[in-house]
Amino acid sequence: MGLSDLLRKSGEVIGDMVQVTRLDSFLKWGQSYSLWPYPFATACCGIEFMGTACSDMDIARFGAERPSFSPRQADMILVLGTITYKMAPVLRQIYDQLSEPKYVVSVGACASSGGMFDTYGVVQGIDRFLPVDIYIPGCPPRPEAIIDGLVKLQEKVKTQGLEERRKEVMRKIDEINERNKPLVVR
Amino acid sequence: MKEKVAEFLDKNFSHFIYSKQEVKSNIPSFFIKPEGIVPVVKALKEEPSLKFDFLNDLTCVDWLGKREPRFEMNYLLKSPSNGHARIMLKVPLDDGESVPSIIGVYKGANWPEREVFDLFGIYFEGHPRMERLIMPDNFQGHPLRKDYPLEGFGQDYLIYDLLQIHQEDKEA
């Protein structure tokens, strides 16, 4: 039996120790279980994330082990809380500092849509200027909801190919630019 | 304390008194003309029997449609050496009028004055840095004015500017 025959049987277990797979799916499998979060906490959702990271809920069980307080060593950014227009350039810059592959999780009503703050100072959803992957509902979300969002992101990381991922981000950025351009009011 | 301050102001600054009205408040309030605010707070701070040497708060009220003139600057002073007595100095202002900065007397007035400028659009003469404190630098309007709509005039220009600024950064 040659190597090419083995490669056709992806996922098959041979004996006790050996399993055949493809390199990219192996990498994505590893990636999905070590999504280090960068918590960008501006409001009460940040407290819920602390509860999620501590021993009762323990987000480490899902591989999001270490809250990275440097964006350069993080895989996903969790936006936890109300984002104002003054904070928006900071968040945008931190997003740019994240190393690829990077994922954006919008936690809670405020980050996803502005929440109850439909006012002059609050961005009505961070998807106005960031390509968001996962929205987590709730005000604030329960820790279970944050873990559910993480599991959904893991599924996404595992199933999405590199080219597919690139296309999705490009499409979202184009949408952001298109949506923001004609609405200028002076 | 109220009689003492009223007597002091009547004796020394009767030409700076805007009007004598009663305010329903447990804090004695005095209405001062804009041009008189700096000499009055300076005298209240330096007079040995009063010693109002602590600026508790500096803020503004917009009485749109309720009072004339429209704005009212509030200076809340405290005298720690006189049983923490407090007085309020009120300076009525019309739209577009400016008021002298009291930084020369109280250094702590720096940021509160910038905040009032940011949110009410009242200009302080002699302030070393009369810029926005809370809202973004490219913000338009003064949001705590009563005629400012809650949702703003359409805040998308802030994001548009953000994306533009970002692109310029990349090109540079």
Image (cartoon, coloured by chain):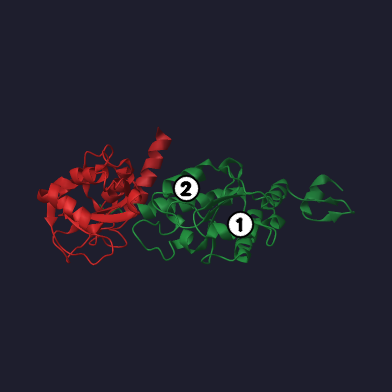
Q: Is residue B81 visible?
A: yes
Q: Is residue A93 left or right of residue A120?
A: right
Evaluate if marks 2 and 1 touch, with contact meaning CB atoms under 8 Å apart.
Answer: no
Q: Is residue B45 left or right of residue A88?
A: left
Between residue B42 and residue A54, name the one nearer to us.
B42
Q: Are marks 2 and 1 on the same chain?
A: yes
In this view, which residue lies farthest toward the top?
A: B172
- Residue at the image position 41 percent from the left and 54 percent from the top: A84
Where does label 1 land, which residue?
A: A50
Q: Amino acid at mark 2?
A: Leu
- Which chain is home to disc 1? A
- Residue at the image position 41 percent from the left and 59 percent from the top: A124
Between residue A126 and residue B171, name the one nearer to us.
A126
Q: Which chain is red?
A: B
Residue B171, position in %: x, y? Answer: 40, 34
Q: Is residue B101 visible?
A: no
Task: Identify the mark at residue A91; answer none if there is no mark.
Answer: 2
Residue B83, position in %: x, y? Answer: 35, 54
Q: Is residue A16 left or right of residue A181?
A: right
Q: Amino acid at mark 1?
A: Met
- Which chain is home to disc 2? A
Between residue A18 and residue B88, name the one nearer to us.
B88
